[in-house]
Amino acid sequence: MTQDHRNKSGFETRAIHAGYEPDPTTGAVIPPIFATSTYKQDGVGGLRGGYEYSRSANPTRTALEGSIAALEEGERGFAFASGLAAEDTLLRALTRPGDHLVFPDDAYGGTFRLVDQVAGPWGLAHTPAPVADVDAMRAAIRTGETKLVWVETPTNPLLNIGDIEALAGVAHDAGALLVVDNTFASPYLQQPLTLGADIVVHSTTKYCGGHSDVIGGALVVRDHEIAERIGFHHNAMGAVAGPFDAWLTLRGLRTLALRMERHSDNAERVVEFLTGHPQVSHVYYPGLPEHPGHDVAARQMRRFGGIVSFRVTGGEEQALAVCDRTEVFTLGESLGGVESLIEHPGRMTHASVAGTELEVPSDLIRLSVGIETADDLVADLEASLGG
Ligand SMILES: *Cc1c(COP(=O)(O)O)cnc(C)c1O
């Protein structure tokens, strides 16, 4: 099968095969971890396969980059040391001081901190806007100055849904690019480039890696010129994924489809339990018909994913107590691994946005529903909520 054929085959086939041909010298079915910084040249400039120095390119990283590009149906992928490293490189590659960014008003806390406290002082202005409100996103654009419209969908932790196709139109009308952070959905549930987005961002730490054993990030683009600019900055800034991290992430991608199906099944069971529980005042899940983004999510996502947020009736005190009591759900930050996690966004992942317009409710709990036995997850929540 040629690379081209692989890119046109089904998602699961691409997840197993794209980005790597069995090693020509050994036949190794799985890419080796190329733990090497440099490569022997056959005469000056005589590179074998284009490899020269591992910041610029490394074969294990190349395999991961090919795989994620194929899964997102993009032109090129780039693997980074973390999701935030990918975001930083993207901002440097595609904006200049004096430019402006439209940004989700409930963005991932670390992304907000990067934009507000690192890119801000560097000279990049931003306006927060609700991703679920296309008109508000349009109104936040400063024509001529806005270079990027940045969207997360579903958002973290409130699971708001942005209409990628509509937002791509809004961005392009203003001469801006649409960036979609696809971390929560993963390429299995949603492929923003096929809906008109220009750049996909991933924290591969989450569902792509999927086993809570590696920090990584990725960018995928569909335009050749943008790929060149990002490729230049990837090498020039150097925040690249190491070969072992790339290998772990690629190993995770092989099973992404299976895992996302099970995450979605289990999340649906958890949502069913939480909805109508007397101690629960609100459940946030785009799969719920009453969720304001349900119709858009149903159109642009294959399923609704593994993240569920909910509010309890007993305020912050009860929210903290529930987080303390669960036994199958581990109290911890991050998401997207095989194990279920519980956290209190106000005190943990979103502590850095306290006191800003991005502050989250103090009675909010976020679950990353793992792939354990669904009955055990429900029983754990039942025992921890009391009643
Ligand atoms: C975790 C996360 C990031 C940041 O990624 P790191 O790998 O932690 O640097 C960005 N966006 C979203 C939605 C995330 O969940």
Image (spheres, rainbow, N blue to C red):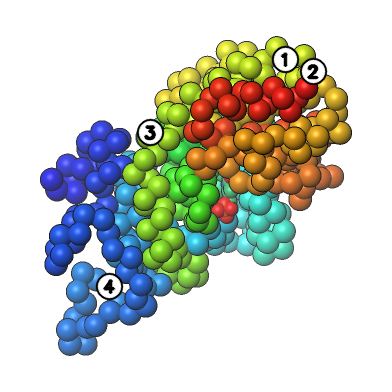
Q: Where is residue 363? Give x, y as percent.
A: 80, 31
**Dot label at residue 387:** 2
Q: Name which of mark 1 and mark 2 comes first in the sequence.
A: 1
Quarter that holds the N terminus: top left
Q: Name which of mark 3 and mark 1 comes first in the sequence.
A: 3
Quarter that holds the C terminus: top right
* Number of the front mark, 4 or 1: 1
Task: Give the amino acid at mark 1.
Answer: His
Circle 1: element type: loop
* Number of the front mark, 3 or 2: 2
The quadrant holding residue 325 is top right
Q: Is 21 placed left or right of 149 in the picture? A: left
Task: Give the amino acid at mark 2.
Answer: Gly
Report the Cα–Cα distance between label 1 and label 2: 9 Å
Circle 3: element type: helix
**Where does label 4 land, which residue?**
51
Q: Name which of mark 3 and mark 2 comes first in the sequence.
A: 3
Report the Cα–Cα distance between label 3 and label 2: 35 Å
User: Residue at left 79%, top 44%?
Assistant: 347
Is the C-beta separation of discs 1 and 2 under 8 Å? yes
**Dot label at residue 258:** 3
Q: Name which of mark 3 and mark 4 comes first in the sequence.
A: 4
**Dot label at residue 277:** 1
